Amino acid sequence: MASIFTKIINGNIPCYKVAEDNDFIAFFDISPLKKGHTLVVPKLEIDYIFDNSDETLSKILVFARKVAKAIERNVECKRIGLIVVGLEVPHTHIHLVPIDHEKDLVFANPRVKMSTEEFTELSKKIYDTFKINN
């Protein structure tokens, strides 16, 4: 059965996309830790990150760096934190979270509430920045 991320990749479920290339897609977490919290996902559905090929592991980090730079240009923060948990959805994914403190990366923290308009506006800004710089 296809993961929720594969359904997003295939266009069966909508998302707030911030970047995409032939191998990866990046979109907002709909229950973000911080404004701009983004998921980076390979289009090939493999559950566990360390079951991916060396090539995919290398390429996902390069893609994630480009996405992180686009987020930084549009969300005020000290840096972008990176987390790989891998238990919530059986499809490899990386969390990119704008942070000012280490505690910003704690999943037990209250989630940020954003309106559809806020998600849409920010995703467009980040997507446009990503496209211009890549």
Image: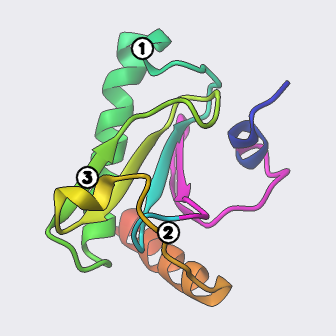
In the picture, which quadrant includes the C terminus?
bottom left
Quick check: 31 left or right of 13? Answer: left
Q: Report the amino acid beneath label 1.
A: Phe
Q: Report the amino acid beneath label 3.
A: Gly
Magenta residues span 9-31
**Front label number (1 vs 2):** 2
Residue receiving disc 3? 81
* Residue 133 rendering spot, x and y as whole percentages: 30, 63
In the picture, which quadrant includes the N terminus?
top right
**Front label number (3 vs 2):** 2
Looking at the image, is 72 positioned above or below residue 58?
A: below
Query: Which residue is at 44% across, 73% downward?
Result: 128
**Depth order, front residue of 4/21:** 4
Looking at the image, is 123 positioned above or below residue 8?
A: below
Query: Is any atom of residue 76 visible in this view?
Result: yes
- Tags 1 and 3 touching, CB below 8 Å: no
Residue receiving disc 1? 50
Q: Report the amino acid beneath label 2.
A: Arg
Residue receiving disc 2? 111
Query: Which residue is at 81% across, 55% downward?
Result: 13
Q: Is mark 1 on a helix, strand or loop?
A: helix
- Is 23 inside the magenta-drawn segment? yes
* Residue 2 rendering spot, x and y as whole percentages: 80, 29
Query: Which residue is at 28% across, 62% downward?
Result: 104
Q: Of marks 3 and 2, which one's residue comes earlier in the chain?
A: 3
Q: Is mark 2 on a helix, strand or loop?
A: loop
- Tags 1 and 2 touching, CB below 8 Å: no
- Is 57 inside the magenta-drawn segment? no
Query: Is any atom of residue 133 visible in this view?
Result: no
